[in-house]
Image (cartoon, grey):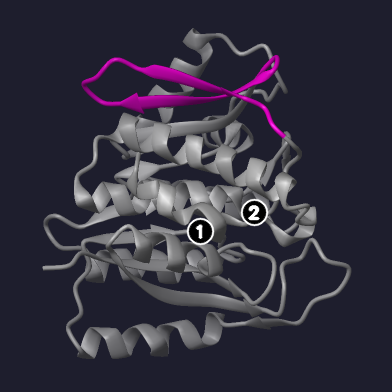
Amino acid sequence: MQKKIAVINDISGFGRCSVAVSLPIISYLGVQCCPVPTSIFSNHTGFPQFFFDDYTDRMEEYIDNWKKLKLQFEGIATGFLGSEKQIQIVKKFIREFSQKDTLVIVDPVMGDHGKLYSTYTEELCREMKELVRMADITTPNLTEACNLTQTPYKPAGWRRRELLAMAEKITALGPSKVVITGIVQGEFIANYIYEKGTEPKLIRTHKVGTERSGTGDVFASIIAADAVKGVPFDKSVRKASGFVKKCILKSIEMEIPRTDGVCFEEILYQLKRD
């Protein structure tokens, strides 16, 4: 049977992020992507203006119809969540739809560069930490990993033992696999891979271009699809980080504006080569 992943995230019509990224990438990797919308945006918030419709009050009715249909999923993946109520709905979704072999992948989207997003209060951070407890795999960036473990943030100069300590604290919450992303090491960007029972790995790629919207969604989508297909975790992280780099390079080559995200469509076929 074809695998299915329920992807709980917002829908942005323009700008290549969230479900607009997850749907084509997960589908291309041979997994059915089933979105649960948390909100609707005309375009992402990096633009000077945007239309926004909060879908929180509709989520439970939407999900109830899936329950009536007795739908089952091999994976449940979460992205940006904008309120405590949304996290509560997601936690309930995981409890009700998880089967024996269902994998839960939580991308704890809370902030970047040492700062939390403006929507994130202390209570919302605590709720996200509780959601991470329910995950099998989590993909925090450095800022989010520091917040989850109450570790002081620093932009660079991380030692392996410090990253190991954070990864161990995160897995102690519940996940068996964690990758801490976006670790600056001079001219490199590193990802720290920790999986219970295996040797931790630090993989590095040369920094290219500038930051773009949606790269985290590209990364997390590959991790989620590979997870339900049984791809080894370290291989999946290498594939995801390498593909993000290729997407950035292609976007620079095609002179795609930063706000438009990465033109992954041009090189999607390369995902099946890795």
Disc 2 or disc 1, which is closer to the eye? 2
Cα distance between the residues tagged 2 and 1: 18 Å
Determine whether 47 is above or below 184 in the image: below
Tell me what residue is drawn at x 64 percent, y 46 percent: 250
Is the magenta region chiefly helix, strand or loop? strand
User: Which quadrant of the structure image shows residue 156?
Assistant: top right
Determine whether 248 is above or below 238 in the image: below
**Number of the label disc, if any, that sits on residue 100:** none
Q: Secondary structure at mark 2?
A: loop
Q: Nearer the viewer, residue 17 or 55?
A: 17
| The N terminus lies in quadrant | bottom left
User: Which quadrant of the structure image shows residue 84?
Assistant: bottom right
Determine whether 151 is above or below 7 in the image: above
Task: Say which residue label 2 marks.
Answer: 262
**Residue 87 included in the magenta stretch of the image:** no
**Residue 197 included in the magenta stretch of the image:** yes
Q: Nearer the viewer, residue 252 or 120?
A: 252
Q: Amino acid at mark 1?
A: Gly
Tell me what residue is drawn at x 57 percent, y 51 percent: 109
Q: How many marks?
A: 2
Residue 256: x percent and y percent? Answer: 75, 56
Q: Amino acid at mark 2?
A: Val
Who comes first in sequence, dot 2 or dot 1? 1
Tell me what residue is drawn at x 31 percent, y 39 percent: 174
Q: Residues within 10 Å of mark 1 (few under 14, many from 20)?
A: many
Task: Please provide the residue range marked out in magenta.
Answer: 185-208
State left or right for residue 13 relative to residue 203.
right
